[in-house]
Image (cartoon, rainbow, N blue to C red):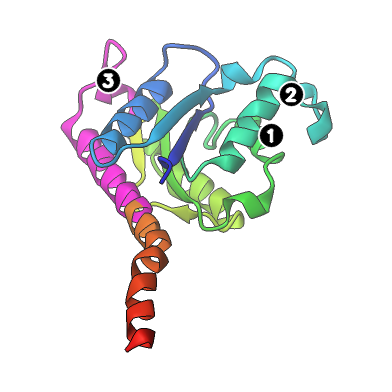
C-alpha cells in the first residue's frame, strides 16, 4: 500500500516565517504517528502571476502544480497569517481554483498566525467555514500562534505545542482508520471464501 500523501500549504510570502514554522511543526508531529509522503508549499512558491489569473488555465505553472498537489493529497495542513481579521486574499484566490469535489471528506488541519491572541478566532470564523464549503473534514483541534509564542522564529509556547500534538494525532487517526477500511475487504475475502466452501 502506498504512503498517504499529505500536502501543506501556507499563505506566507516570505521564508522563513512563523506560519511556515507552524506548518513544519505540524508536519513533523504527524510524522511521529505514521509514515507519510509530506510536501510543504508556501504562497511564494506559486509565483508572482497567481494574482493576475482569473481562470485555471491562466495559472502560472508553479501555482497550477500547487493546486494539483492539493487536489491529489490524502490530507492537508493549511495555514495563513492574519491580515485585517482574515486569511490573506491570495490564499482564498488560490483555493478558488481548487475543484470542490477534490476536497470532499479530506482531512484538513487548520492553522494561523497573528500579532496577538485577538486574532485567534480567525481559524473558527474564516478558515473553518471556507473548508466547510468544500465539505472537507476539518480536524477539531486547530492551531493558532501569535508573535509571543515564537522566539527567533522558533515555536516555544508549550500550549501551542500541545495543540499541534493533538491536531497531528487526530489527523493520523483519521488516515489510519481510512487505510484500515480500504484494507478490510482484502482481509475479509479469504474468510468469505472459506465460509462458502463449507
Give the residue displayed 55% in from the left and 16% down from the top.
Answer: 13
Residue placed most toward the observer, 133 or 146: 133
In this rendering, would 133 be left or right of 32? right
Taking depth in this image into account, of 13 and 39 the one nearest to the observer is 39
Q: Earlier in the sequence, mark 3 or mark 2?
A: 2
What span is in magenta?
146-175
Q: Residue 155 falls in which quadrant of the image? A: top left
Label at residue 51: 2
Q: Which residue is pictured at 37% across the width and 36% down the height?
A: 36
170 within the magenta span? yes
Q: Which of the marked residues, 1 or 3, is nearer the chain's N terminus?
A: 1
Q: Horizontal and vertical percent for residue 136?
A: 52, 54
Compared to 156, does 124 lie above or below? below
Of badges 1 and 3, nearer the viewer stands: 1
Q: Are marks 1 and 3 in contact (CB under 8 Å)?
A: no
Magenta stretch secondary structure, dominant: helix
Q: CA distance from mark 2 to mark 1?
A: 7 Å
Q: CA distance from mark 3 to mark 2?
A: 30 Å
Is 164 in the magenta?
Answer: yes
Rendered image: mark on residue 150 = 3
SS at mark 2 in the image: helix
The outermost residue toward the left is 158
Disc 1 crowd rating (10 Å Cα; few below 14, some 14-19, many 20+) is some
Q: Is residue 186 left or right of residue 53?
A: left
Q: Seen from this angle, which residue lies furthest front?
A: 197
Residue at 67% from the left image edge and 20% from the top image edge:
62
Q: Residue at x 52, y 24 (%)?
A: 41
Of circles 3 and 2, the one toward us is 2
Q: Are the residues flagged by discs 2 and 1 in contact, CB closer than 8 Å?
A: yes
Amino acid at each position: 500500500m502506498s504512503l498517504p500523501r499529505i500536502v501543506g500549504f501556507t499563505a506566507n510570502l516570505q521564508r522563513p516565517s512563523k506560519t511556515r514554522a507552524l506548518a513544519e511543526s505540524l508536519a513533523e508531529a504527524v510524522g511521529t504517528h505514521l509514515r507519510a509522503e509530506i510536501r510543504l508549499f508556501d504562497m511564494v512558491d506559486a509565483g508572482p502571476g497567481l494574482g493576475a489569473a482569473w481562470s485555471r488555465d491562466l495559472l502560472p505553472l508553479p501555482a497550477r502544480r500547487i493546486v494539483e498537489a492539493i487536489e491529489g493529497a490524502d490530507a492537508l495542513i493549511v495555514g495563513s497569517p492574519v491580515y485585517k481579521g482574515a486569511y490573506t486574499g491570495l490564499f482564498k484566490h488560490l483555493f478558488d481554483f481548487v475543484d470542490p469535489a477534490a476536497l470532499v471528506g479530506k482531512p484538513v488541519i487548520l492553522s494561523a498566525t497573528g500579532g496577538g491572541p485577538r486574532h485567534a478566532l480567525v481559524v473558527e470564523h474564516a478558515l473553518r467555514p471556507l473548508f466547510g464549503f468544500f465539505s472537507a473534514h476539518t480536524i477539531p483541534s486547530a492551531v493558532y500562534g501569535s508573535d509571543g509564542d515564537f522566539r527567533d522564529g522558533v515555536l516555544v509556547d508549550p500550549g501551542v505545542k500541545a495543540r499541534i500534538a493533538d491536531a497531528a494525532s487526530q489527523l493520523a487517526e483519521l488516515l489510519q482508520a481510512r487505510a484500515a477500511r480500504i484494507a478490510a475487504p482484502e482481509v475479509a475475502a479469504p474468510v468469505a471464501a472459506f465460509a462458502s466452501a463449507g
